[in-house]
Image: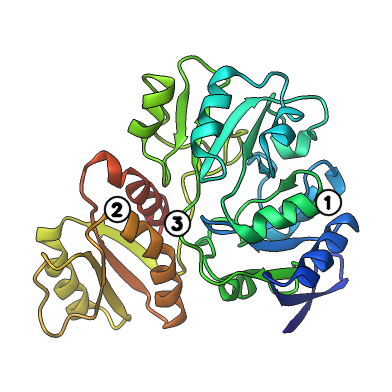
Amino acid sequence: MLNSSPNSNGRVCTTQILDGFDRGSIDRAVSVLHSGGLVAFPTETVYGLGADGLNSESVAKIFEAKGRPSTNPLILHVSSINVAESLVRKWTDLAQKLADKFWPGPLTIILPASGIVPEIVRAGNPTVALRCPNHQIALELLTSFDGPLAAPSANKTTETSPTKPEHVLNSLAGKVDLILDGGRTVAGIESTIINLAETPPRLLRPGPICPKELEEIVGKLSRFEGTVPTEIAQIAPGMSQRHYAPKARLTIHEATELVTHYNELKQNTKEKIVAVVFGSEVALPPNCDHRRLPLEPYGASARLYAVLHDLDSQGYQEVLFQKPPLTEDWLAVTDRLSRAADGG
């Protein structure tokens, strides 16, 4: 499948979709990366937009394609601990313990960067974010490329992250050279990010790995809460106020109030409205257009972005989302929804 459009320099870029499980597709992707191009590929979390992580000019194309501010650093994806060690000043005992437990997997580790990591990747910070993804296609690509790949989510900045190749194409057609099709991602939301460059270690972004799982290894975590303005350099992705957002306006409501808000909107607007709830506990009226996510954090997070993409494709303009439970295992879902709703 091919899709073409001009980039900001007027050059026509053709986006090609290939079967990521085919060896020839991996070879083609490696060739694109070595020539300075962009390749979208699946991980267990979301699809990433990959470029040669040690080539500043290639990495700059990621920022251009996404419309990403230069203050937002990128995660370097690696195939092994050995590669990660070359990208930091010191690979610590804590980093080793975390990698032994969670790599390959949805954990990003931040440490002081070595001199080979380009400033553009770090957004000017002295640190670098590293992850070894747990996906056959991603690992085969990284091993074949034989180097780190800078790879944020493969979508325009602030938009909902892609969990299927179609989502990538809808957002970045003509801006990415090649998409490796690996089907739907499993975890459905971005990795957990822990900063080991400070003491005590700090949780910067909640994700599929819960804080209590990390604390079993590193001890008590401090936690980042709040947002970082776009004009200020962030130490990790996902810290901005507006992020992960659908085209529709998304608002969050307590379960007891959601139906009331839905009925009020129905009476006062002609916009297309939908309610999204968890499980079957919320009693919805027969006329309520709705979607249900599992009342279980990992099941809900795996489906969250897919549902938001689907609602956008169906033209909904207002999405009323039930507030997730206030427990630690729901922290990642709560974080994504709060940033998707902010400013909407």
Residue nearer the viewer, 209 or 137: 137
| Label 3, residues with CA under 10 Å away: few <14, some 14-19, many ≥20 | many
Q: Residue furthest top?
A: 199
Amino acid type at image mark 3 = Ala
Foreground: disc 3 or disc 1: 3
According to the picture, the residue beneath numbered tag 3 turns out to be: 187
Mark 3 and mark 1 residues within 8 Å of each other at the beta carbon:
no
Amino acid type at image mark 1 = Ser
Mark toward the start of the polypeptide (3 vs 1): 1
- Can you tell which mark lies on residue 58? 1
- The answer to whether residue 44 is left or right of residue 203 is right
Quadrant of the rendered image containing residue 175: bottom right
Q: Residue furthest right?
A: 35
- Can you tell which mark lies on residue 297? 2
Disc 3 to disc 1, how far (Cα)? 28 Å
Disc 2 to disc 1, how far (Cα)? 37 Å
Residue located 32% across and 43% down the image = 331
- The answer to whether residue 16 is left or right of residue 247 is right
Mark toward the start of the polypeptide (3 vs 2): 3
Foreground: disc 2 or disc 1: 2
The correct choice, above or below, for 337 with respect to 41 in the image is above
Name the element at disc 3.
Answer: loop
Q: Where residue 276 appears, x then y in whole percent?
A: 26, 68
Name the element at disc 1.
Answer: helix
